[in-house]
Amino acid sequence: MQAFIDQLIISSGDPVLLQQLVVWLSAITVFVLVLGGAFLGLSATDPVRRRVSSLTTENKQEKEDSILKVVTSVGPLAAFLLPQDEVERSEAMRKLQHAGFRKAVALQVYYMIKTVLIFVFPLGVVVARTWMPDTTSSNVLLYAVIASGVGMLLPNYVLHKLVEKRARAITNAFPDALDLLVVCVESGLGLAAAIQRVGDELEVSHPELAYELSMVNAEIRVGVPREQALKNLADRTGLPDIRGMVGLLIQTMRFGTGVADSLRVYSEEFRDKRTQKAEEEAAKMGTKLVFPLIFCMFPVFFIVAIGPAVIRIIDAFM
């Protein structure tokens, strides 16, 4: 590379021109790399591409084959990885369902990942000791124990964040779904047909909630009672807003009142609830701004305003 640069200097005879050429070529290279990365990112998040890939039978078959391989590999170890406490297993399965992992092997894979990380992280500490020769054996043992604890707690933290992310996505999609459901029911569709239509409409913009609604329709088609299918929807999501709507629909079907009127009333109450929540968050804004003002803005303001005077006073007495 250095020989190539020297040859360019000799051939051009102008180091300044060569420097400008290198700068321009570097700028063009960085621009092309950023443009390509942005194009790849937009292509990966394109809803049309996501919809087409979800409808492709080859992708579905590949996913099913990968799941089958995982099931085959994890199956013999499931008895040793799963906890013996039934309450702990139920709680972990509930969190996995709320995060969107509904396969039967999800619980086994989750505990397999925890087990692997418990042993891999301390092994990484032992391997990293070769770059830290001054570290004593007792410190390495301490770091290995800490790394093992991190490997045990890291999947819990990641799962908690995935649950929060999915709950936030479903919560953001719920107002649109509720309005569409009210329109579909008032236009004459039945409850099952209205849920199916809303799920189809939200499949691209809000795939998480569309998937949950499609699960409700699938359960109704296979013979599950509508009340039980709606209760399963509330259990799978774990959100109070959906639980309230499910309770309202079950009560409406039980007493024979109009579904459209009940949904209209619930929609208005839900809008009022969201407005009150927004007002509550706005009222908390003043209190939350106290800490940034005290610890970030006020010290800088005092340094800028009083700093020059303090420096002059020190120079006067020195």
Image: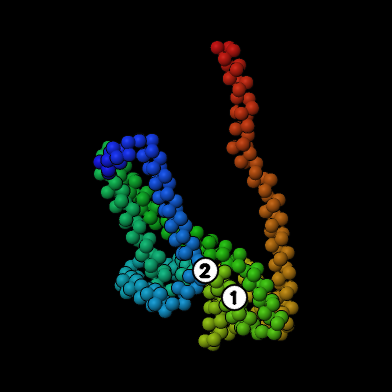
Q: Estimate the x, y position of residue 70 in percent, counting from the top left.
A: 34, 71
Quarter occupied by residue 11: top left
Pick whichever of labels 2 and 1 is earlier in the sequence.
2
Q: Is residue 44 above or below residue 213?
A: above
Q: Estimate the x, y position of residue 227 in percent, counting from the top left.
A: 61, 81
Q: Is residue 19 above or below residue 145?
A: above
The answer to whether 258 appears left or right of 291 in the picture is right
Task: Residue at 57% x, 77% y: name it.
Answer: 200
Q: CA distance from mark 2 to mark 1?
A: 13 Å
Quarter occupied by residue 258: bottom right
Closer mark to the observer between disc 2 and disc 1: 2
Task: Residue at 45% x, 73% y: name it.
Answer: 53
Task: Residue at 62% x, 83% y: name it.
Answer: 193
Amino acid type at circle 2 is Pro
Q: Is residue 120 above or below residue 197?
A: above
Quarter occupied by residue 244: bottom right
What residue is pinned by disc 1? 201
Farthest residue in the top direction?
317
Q: Quadrant of the N terminus?
A: top left
Q: Quadrant of the C terminus?
A: top right
The answer to whether 261 appears left or right of 48 in the picture is right
Q: Secondary structure at mark 1?
A: helix
> Can residue 272 be seen?
yes
The answer to whether 165 appears left or right of 9 in the picture is right
Disc 2 to disc 1: CB gap under 8 Å: no
Q: Estimate the x, y position of residue 222 in percent, counting from the top left.
A: 52, 86
| Circle 2 Cα neighbour tier, 10 Å, few/some/many (<14 / 14–19 / ≥20) | some
> Can residue 84 be seen?
no
What residue is pinned by disc 2? 47
Amino acid type at circle 1 is Glu
Q: Estimate the x, y position of residue 107 in percent, counting from the top left.
A: 41, 69
